[in-house]
């Protein structure tokens, strides 16, 4: 049988039988997607608000049903002190207190009836959402009480901008991160095989070096495909992420990105003489890439100094490119720049590895 | 490109091989030949330069200078022409820890255009019960046997075995010896390195003793011994009444020694010396206890050559 094929199969078997490698390359990104997905997707607008009705009149009842009728808002009954305490534990986002005498004040119309609202300014987003909500509901109530139609009413029209939901941002980002890991992790079995003299033993056979490297690359690309299927599958099936781009373009970017990072793995293997050193160097490379390349938050949101760092890192361009072609993300750099930078990384890393990699 | 090998041509011809690592001369001017169909042994302590020499012959290392022809191929210039025709068992080489015995054999078999069936090799190397065991779970001796099996996957003309029995128990060692002698009877040539004296005596047609990167002496076991030691020793438990003068005057005796209550008579004529010992003790009304002849061993040769024992 063909040596290249059998060697690829042997690599796959070795990989599948190595539980740690299997976890880091397949389970780890999956955990990321599911973890972030369940935190940030779906019920993002769901909130609970405490409602303490100290008045108990039909007017306060109306107010309560006005709040209760709002989509995604759950009212929690209780007394004032108790509800405010529950704000501290995050059970309710705000507390509305309807004081005694509210009903009378509304029907007297002498002075505005006061409603107390407890909010938490440290949760700025939730705080302003609550203020808007309360304002909106009270103005509706005011209209109903006064019986006058509003002079001006807004008509909201939605315009879809590039404002991605976080999970849509995350799926291509985590795919990029996983492809990076598959590539960079190529260093570890390679150095282990050299240290155990397996590479030397292979050198004593007619096997060609390109066959050895080729089988290694084939195996890694297969894992890359598997990761793409898993991550995109979970993203689309579980979290309703829409993949909008063309698959040939996505495939080309995945291929180029994987090859660039496999080459980076070979560079690490060129300078690590032991398996432990390879482990250390792999971590030293992968963690900055993971956190400084815009995987978990947009690069535009980074301080300027880190932005400069991000511009130097190859994962920035793979992640950005994948977001552009997969979910129509806002470009950090034009797509052709992503391709060009990854191609440059591939060429440079290949050159360094070809120059410095030792087989024994 | 290469001259065809016939039975008469040596399978290995090395002349003035030099391999230096910085100031260290790992191989310092080694010259020898290995005849086709023979077993040749490189004998020496660790660090003698045996492995470096073998790895140059296998095309794994480039020497600083010297000429190396293996199976008629100029190994330094055309290592790839040689590789399909030789079998190699490296010292201490691990073999894809997560793959099973059969998987590793099939994999290596795929690297060669021709070869032997995996089942045959598994049976030959007594690994039938370990077919589906991962190599990381094999014992040292089993791993060594797999390494030798891998050296045979391509049905090679010439087999290099670097310390093939290290880590084996005596029974496994003997069964490997049978394998090596079997290779020889099939007309293959074998180059092995060892630091086991007995192994070299049993297996090798010719032996080169190496130390400090040089070959100190080369020849058959008998040649090596008789070149250094002309006499054998007749020994027996010391007998009161036989004086040293009497013993030294016996026919053939060149010198004598007392050792742990034994008398050792170094002699060029063993039968005459034994006859004289029997006559003299009979005259005293006694019979010499534990009478025997001690043959010098390779160990003695090595000790004599280097001033130290082979295995420290």
Image (cartoon, helix red, strand yellow):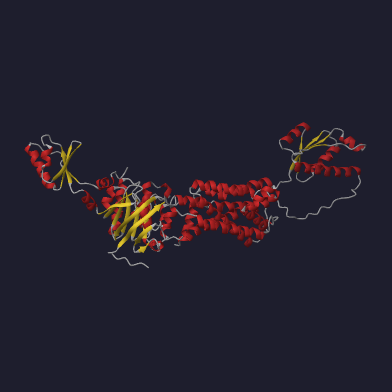
Front residue of B226 and B152: B226
Residue B85: x and y in percent read: 37, 62
Identify whether A291 is placed above or below A206.
above
Quick check: B132 left or right of B235?
A: right
Residue B189: x and y in percent read: 31, 59
Identify whether B141 is placed above or below B286.
below
Residue pushed farthest left? B283
Task: Please report the residue visible at 11 percent of the width from the left and 46 percent of the height from the top.
Answer: B272
Quick check: A199 left or right of A231?
A: left
Picture quadrant of residue B74: bottom left
Which quarter of the image is occupied by the N terminus of chain A?
Answer: bottom left
Picture quadrant of residue B277: top left
Residue B90: x and y in percent read: 38, 53
Front residue of A351 and A50: A351
Front residue of B167 and B67: B67
Task: Please report the residue visible at 6 percent of the width from the left and 38 percent of the height from the top.
Answer: B283
Front residue of B108 and A190: A190
Identify whether B292 is placed above or below B25.
above
């Amino acid at each position: 049988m063909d040596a290249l094929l059998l060697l690829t199969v042997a690599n796959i078997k070795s990989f599948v039988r190595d539980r740690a490698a299997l976890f880091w390359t397949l389970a780890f990104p999956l955990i990321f997607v599911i973890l972030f997905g369940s935190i940030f997707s779906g019920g993002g607008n769901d909130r609970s608000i405490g409602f303490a009705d100290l008045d108990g009149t039909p007017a306060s009842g109306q107010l309560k049903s006005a709040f209760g009728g709002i989509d995604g808002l759950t009212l929690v009954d209780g007394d004032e002190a108790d509800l405010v305490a529950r704000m501290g534990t995050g059970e309710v986002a705000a507390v509305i207190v309807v004081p005694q005498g509210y009903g009378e004040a509304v029907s007297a119309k002498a002075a505005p009836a006061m409603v107390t609202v407890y909010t938490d300014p440290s949760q700025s987003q939730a705080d302003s959402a609550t203020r808007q909500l309360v304002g909106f509901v009270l103005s509706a109530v005011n209209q109903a009480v006064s019986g006058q139609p509003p002079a001006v009413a807004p008509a909201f029209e939605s315009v879809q901008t590039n404002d991605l939901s976080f999970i849509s941002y995350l799926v291509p980002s985590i795919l990029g991160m996983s492809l990076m890991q598959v590539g960079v992790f190529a260093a570890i079995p390679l150095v282990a095989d050299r240290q155990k003299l397996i590479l030397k033993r292979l050198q004593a056979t007619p096997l060609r070096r390109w066959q050895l490297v080729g089988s290694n690359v084939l195996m890694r690309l297969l894992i890359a495909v598997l990761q793409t299927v898993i991550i995109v599958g979970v993203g689309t099936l579980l979290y309703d992420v829409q993949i909008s781009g063309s698959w040939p373009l996505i495939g080309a970017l995945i291929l180029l990105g994987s090859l660039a990072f496999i080459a980076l793995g070979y560079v690490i293997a060129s300078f690590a003489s032991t398996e432990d050193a390879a482990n250390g160097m792999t971590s030293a490379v992968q963690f900055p890439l993971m956190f400084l390349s815009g995987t978990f938050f947009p690069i535009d949101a980074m301080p300027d100094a880190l932005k400069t760092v991000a511009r130097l890192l190859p994962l920035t361009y793979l992640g950005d490119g994948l977001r552009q072609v997969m979910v129509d993300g806002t470009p950090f750099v034009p797509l052709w720049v992503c391709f060009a930078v990854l191609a440059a990384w591939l060429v440079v890393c290949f050159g360094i590895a070809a120059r410095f990699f030792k087989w024994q | 490109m290469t001259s065809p090998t016939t039975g008469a041509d040596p399978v290995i011809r090395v002349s003035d091989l030099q391999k230096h690592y910085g100031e260290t001369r790992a191989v310092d001017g080694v010259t020898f030949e290995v005849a086709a169909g023979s077993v040749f042994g490189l004998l020496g302590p660790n660090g003698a330069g045996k492995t470096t020499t073998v790895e140059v012959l296998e095309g794994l290392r480039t020497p600083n200078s010297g000429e190396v022809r293996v199976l008629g191929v100029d190994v330094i210039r055309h290592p790839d022409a040689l590789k399909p025709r030789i079998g190699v068992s490296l010292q201490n080489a691990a073999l894809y820890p997560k793959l099973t015995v059969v998987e590793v054999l099939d994999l290596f078999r795929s690297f060669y255009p021709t070869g032997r069936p995996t089942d045959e090799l598994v049976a030959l190397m007594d690994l039938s019960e370990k077919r589906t065991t991962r190599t990381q779970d094999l014992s040292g001796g089993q791993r060594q046997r797999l390494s030798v099996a891998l050296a045979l996957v391509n049905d090679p003309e010439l087999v290099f075995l670097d310390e093939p029995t290290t880590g084996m128990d005596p029974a496994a060692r003997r069964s490997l010896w049978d394998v090596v002698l079997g290779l020889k009877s099939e007309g293959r040539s074998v180059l092995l390195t060892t630091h086991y004296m007995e192994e070299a005596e049993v297996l090798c047609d010719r032996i080169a003793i190496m130390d400090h990167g040089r070959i100190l002496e080369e020849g058959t076991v008998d040649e090596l011994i008789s070149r250094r030691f002309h006499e054998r020793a007749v020994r027996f438990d010391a007998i009161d009444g036989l004086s040293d003068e009497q013993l030294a005057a016996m026919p053939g005796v060149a010198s004598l020694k007392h050792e742990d209550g034994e008398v050792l008579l170094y002699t060029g004529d063993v039968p005459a010396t034994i006859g004289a010992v029997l006559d003299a003790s009979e005259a005293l009304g006694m019979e010499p206890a534990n009478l025997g002849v001690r043959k010098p061993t390779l160990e003695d040769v090595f000790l004599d050559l280097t001033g130290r024992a082979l295995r420290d």
